[in-house]
Image: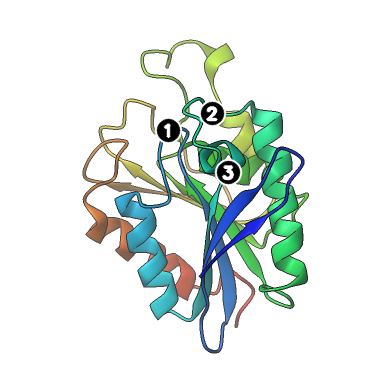
Amino acid sequence: MSVELETPHGPARAHLHPAAKPVAALVLGHGANGAVGAPDLVAVTQAAGEAGFTVVLVEQPYRVAERRSPAPAHQLDSAWEAVLEQLRADALNGLDVIVGGRSSGARVACRTAQSVGAAAVLCLAFPLHAPGKADDPAKSRLGELEAVAVPVLIVQGESDPFGMPPEAPGRDVVRVPGNHSLRSTAPVVAAVSDWLASGVAGRT
């Protein structure tokens, strides 16, 4: 089921995969030039659904409008916040919510984790830096990860040209075969399933 939700930057689209008796919710965003049909997002959606999670895949307004260039970060963030507010008031009412996404979507989830009241954050292929910029501290996005105060799981391809984020207290990093695309989904699903089963969304 898909619904359009108004945001300050035009309508976003939410693809809902409701669980019959949800234990929590998982809301995921897409990459900068990607879509919600990316292999890792599809695989994680199925695995989380089988684990009893209601899953929502969110298309940012620029994608709904079929624009190729990603919107600026502040627009991505405010659109995401508007979507989460509406989902929490309706389809996800009363549920713990884990937020996340792949690449750019993971960055949005990290930057807004506090404002949307996330229980945890799932990052698929977090772009720690632009390719070839590992030695330039000014290009690092590590601060976005370090600002998250709830548990974080990062699933990262071993040969990802966007870098390998470091582990830290409350932040787990699972290295899997592959690069930024995470097309080998089995190890991604295994890592995410274990993390969700650990009770990260507040279950006992």
Q: Is residue 117 visible?
A: no
The number of numbered discs placed on residues in the rendered structure image is 3
Residue 113 coordinates in the image, percent (x, y): 69, 49
Which element is circle 3 on? Answer: loop
Q: Residue at x 45, y 35 (%)?
A: 165
Q: Earlier in the sequence, mark 1 or mark 3?
A: 1
Q: Are marks 3 and 2 in contact (CB under 8 Å)?
A: yes
Q: Residue at x 31, y 65 (%)?
A: 190
Q: What is the number of the mark on residue 33?
A: 1
Q: Are marks 1 and 3 in contact (CB under 8 Å)?
A: no
Q: Earlier in the sequence, mark 1 or mark 2?
A: 1
Q: Residue at x 61, y 46 (%)?
A: 109
Bin the neighbour count of mark 2 within 10 Å (Cα to Cα): few under 14, some 14-19, many 20 and up: some
Which element is circle 1 on? Answer: loop
Residue situated in front as seen by the camera: 130 or 143: 130
Name the side, left or right, on which 134 lies relative to 73.
left
Q: Earlier in the sequence, mark 3 or mark 2?
A: 3
Q: Quadrant of the C terminus?
A: bottom right
Q: Residue at x 71, y 30 (%)?
A: 74
Q: Is residue 94 visible?
A: yes
Residue 21 coordinates in the image, percent (x, y): 55, 89
Which element is circle 2 on? Answer: loop
Q: Eyeballing the image, is 104 above or below 96?
A: above
* Residue topped by disc 3: 60
* Residue topped by disc 2: 70
> Which amino acid, mark 1?
Asn
Residue 156 coordinates in the image, percent (x, y): 36, 43
Residue 118 coordinates in the image, percent (x, y): 68, 58
Real-space Cα separation, disc 1 to disc 2, in angstroms: 7 Å
> Which amino acid, mark 2?
Pro
